[in-house]
Amino acid sequence: MKIILNTIIMLVLFVGILNAQTFFVNQNIDRSQEPKPGKLFSMELPKIERAKLKNGLNILIVEHRELPVVQLQLVIKTGAEGDPKGKAGLANLTADMLDEGTKKRSALQIADDLDFIGASVSTSANFDGSLGSLLTLKEHLSSAMDIFSDIILNPKFPQSEFDRLKNELLTDLLAQKVRPDIIATNIFNQKLFGSEHPYSQNLDGNEESVSNINIEDVKIFYHTYYSPNNASLIVVGDITKNEAIKMAEKYFGKWKKKDVVLPIVKKPEGESEPRIYIVHKEDAPQSQIRVGNIGIERNNTDFHAVNILNQILGASNGRLFLNLREAKGYTYGAYAYFAMMRYPGPFLAYAGVKTDVTDSSIIEFMKEINRVRDELVPEDEFEMYKTAVIQRLPRVFETPAQIAGQLMAIELFNLPEDYFSTLIEKYKRITREDIRYIANKYLHPEIITIVVVGDKNAIKEKIERLGYGRVIICDEKGKE
């Protein structure tokens, strides 16, 4: 049965490839010339139906009949932002424990039952929510829902499975301690957000915080936040609205609601002055560089302009890449992104560069940040990046899983009901002047935070001469 479902998944991917090939077929391409912007277009978006159970569970339904499959996503609207102080990683561990045994099924039985009907279940957490996903053939929906609802509603949290998962996580975290790229990102977040903010922590936690977590913490997190009135059920696929509501009522209707006190998270403030933190790695052949500041939240109305700004600056064909890799040859790749979550996340530009060009690379990072703030993006360049963003939009609505992922954003970030239907028009209205305005609003070289993991003996004096900010030496945990 699993072979059947895997075949269906491959067909979905194959259809997407054919669509992409159809777009490019018979086009005369002069590869010596830079590609011109494509024609902007509109797209047909899925109709979203809504319902709500008496216990407060929100239901979003999209009929998608191309294949006889159904994708479900249960979204708990609390994630790692609910981790208690000193126990970062708890939300993630709680989600991982859901399918490790219920009151009537062991972890092995869950795996066997899913395998028998060719269904798949996954559980995870991010900063904004905790997620459970189910993909199944329509003909096995009832059996799959019996397993899925059992996982969500009746987890047993066996001590033996908790010990195993915790030890596996600690092993992974131990391996991360020697990776300069992970050290650089962790310290960047720590310094930018401050130790009290959840975004300062790794989603998986660290050795100390995970060691502090016990099985009772997992149970408390589950019973505190896993509640129908703090959740949404997203249903996409070969199913009608009435079928979806009946299914939700049957399997989640008896889930009892409770008072949920959501965690209070203060808006991050970032640094008050520019600072450069150096983490010493003896004889390191490379320096890992992180440059950035506090960015924006996901439901900000500037989201669309920021997306285009990010494409211009940080994409694989963006200015940082073209400068530091193509023009200068300092690195294999230089990128940037805005992490947009429930609260303002980081703007982060990053690269791993050769040690002897560490200071020169920082100069180029700052040059590109200032250039997009000071100058209008040339018309051809702007249209190329803007068109690239718009032309990618249909690809995130091709499969049930992709559609469910987009609906999850509506629920987690309280996006307006017409969000998707107005998406393309909002992108089309963005101008070059908007990009310069947005760059000045969200890129702040005057309070920039820079982290460099590398050989301080080879890079410290050169970095100090740049004059971009106070240089501070800290260890691999960020201690100054």
Image (spheres, rainbow, N blue to C red):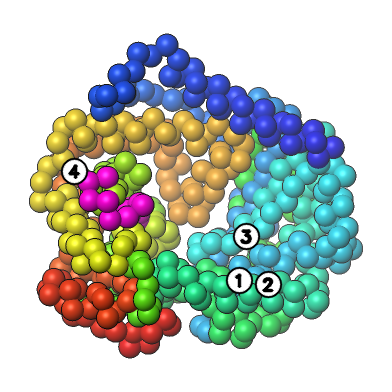
Residue 423 image offset from top left, x and y in percent: 38, 36
Identify the residue at image location x=60%, y=80%: 210
Residue mark closest to the camera, 3 vs 2 = 2
Identify the residue at image location x=18%, y=43%: 434
Left or right: 322, with 131 as reference point: left
- Going by the numbered disc 1, the residue's amino acid type is Asp
Question: Of helix, strand and loop, which one carries label 1?
Answer: helix
Q: Earlier in the sequence, mark 3 or mark 1?
A: 3
Tell me if I can see residue 310 in this picture: no
Q: CA distance from mark 4 to mark 3?
A: 36 Å
Instruction: Give the image quarter of residue 30.
Output: top left
Residue 362 image offset from top left, x and y in percent: 22, 63
Residue mark closest to the camera, 1 vs 4 = 1
Question: Of helix, strand and loop, which one carries label 2?
Answer: helix
Residue 371 image offset from top left, x and y in percent: 14, 51
Q: CA distance from mark 3 to mark 2?
A: 16 Å
The residue tagged 1 is 172
The residue tagged 3 is 124
The residue tagged 4 is 434
Residue mark closest to the camera, 4 vs 2 = 2
Q: Earlier in the sequence, mark 4 or mark 2?
A: 2
